[in-house]
Image (cartoon, rainbow, N blue to C red):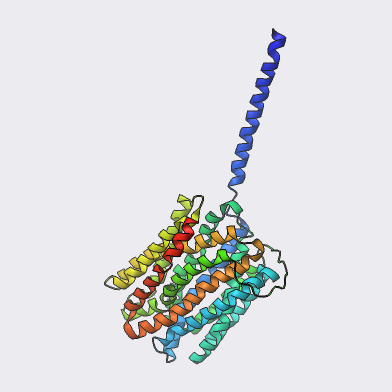
Amino acid sequence: MRHREAPPRQAERAGARTACVRRRCRMTDLSVSKPRLLTRQFALVWALTFVTFFAAFQLFPTVPLRLRELGASLAESGRFMSLFTAGSALGALFTGPLGDRVGHRRLVVTCALLYAGFLAAYALMPVRWGFYLLAFPHGVVWSGLLTATLASLAHVLPEDRRADGMSLYGLASPGGVIFGPLLGMWIFQHWGFAPIGWYLALLFLLLGALGSILPKDHPHGRAEGFKWPDAVVLAPCMVLFCVALGYGALGSYTAQEGLALGMPLPSAFLSFMAVGMVLMRIAMVKRGFGKRPIRKLPGMLIGAFAGMALLAALPGGMARHMASALLYGAGYSMLHTLLNAKLLESVDPQRRGSAFGALLFAFDSGIGLGSFTLGWVIGHHGYRMGWALGALAMLAALPVALKLGRD
């Protein structure tokens, strides 16, 4: 009897050992399924993006004011942004594939150094036509810096945590937008425009040095000609284009409206927009994105639309800018995160630079067109009419966002 019972006991012990091994394997799988996001490489890419936007959003609200000093009208002062973003939009179609071929780290360093040269030239520029002449090539360099930095992020984010990683990474740009306009406007009001150009030129030299220690990527080196973006890129591009039509006027004209109204903080909209972006990103990191983050796209678009509609409709000045900016920023911030995460999971890894270049083309062409057309409306019919038309433009993207959310 004992001899007959031994095999079952042995089998039972073997089964217990197997179950234990399986539990350990499941625990190991859980640890593998949630790798660390806050690595040294991720922190470096985050810092590069923060510095880029911190510098740019000192430039965007102060250049129109400098142009006004040089004799430009209210409507004309937005043309720098139009030319700059036209260069960025068209350049992105080529700098994106260029980064795929020559390497994203190399492109980051080169563009940062060229960017410093443009800023130094602005500091010396005595006539407004010089700003317009430099704006287009400056935008091309900006597109190379943005597409290469964003493509570099793909090398440091775990594949199964890209939505979470993109949300954390997305705190970098609004962080720069919160503090950049405040500092830029303060310097401009106390010492003029030239110190902004010189100090930002030095900042971008530092940015170029930091770029040299980015993770090394592996360019494929294929000398391909221009290609239209894959079909999967077209719908995200359409959404960002419609959003950018209104966004383009915000960067050029909210601070000018604040000055015209005598607001104690003329750049309040840009700064509080960034606060709204940060708060929404923190909330989404804690809440999580679920298995299909893109489903949240329509709700975020409606939030951004509501914020801009309030900017057009609410009475008052400072409180109106702050409240509408918080709501607009909360919705707007996640649009980029959700669309970028969608592209990361659906685009050929060897064509990521091209995909992000197409997305930047759509966004910046919308900014340029919006800054020009809504600037004309603002110059002839007032700020509120411009904000209302910008809000209506976002509604045109809602059907496409709904379709993306269902796919």
Q: Is residue 187 visible?
A: no
Judged from this view, the residue extending furthest toward the left is 315
**Residue 208: x %, y % from top left:** 63, 72
**Residue 6: x %, y % from top left:** 70, 14
Q: Is residue 372 visible?
A: yes
Taking depth in this image into account, of 17 and 177 the one nearest to the observer is 17
Taking depth in this image into account, of 316 and 331 the one nearest to the observer is 331
User: Splitting the image into 4 quarters, where does residue 246 fall?
Assistant: bottom left
Relative vertical location of residue 36 with respect to residue 61 in this rendering, above or below: above
268 relative to 142 in the view: left or right: left
Residue plotted at (60% across, 74% down): 93
Relative vertical location of residue 189 with respect to residue 351 in this rendering, above or below: below
**Residue 231: x %, y % from top left:** 57, 65
Quadrant showing the N terminus: top right
**Residue 264: x %, y % from top left:** 33, 75
Residue plotted at (45% across, 71% down): 242
243 relative to 379 in the view: left or right: right
Judged from this view, the residue extending furthest toward the top is 1
Taking depth in this image into account, of 27 and 18 the one nearest to the observer is 18
User: Splitting the image into 4 quarters, where does residue 391 fall?
Assistant: bottom left
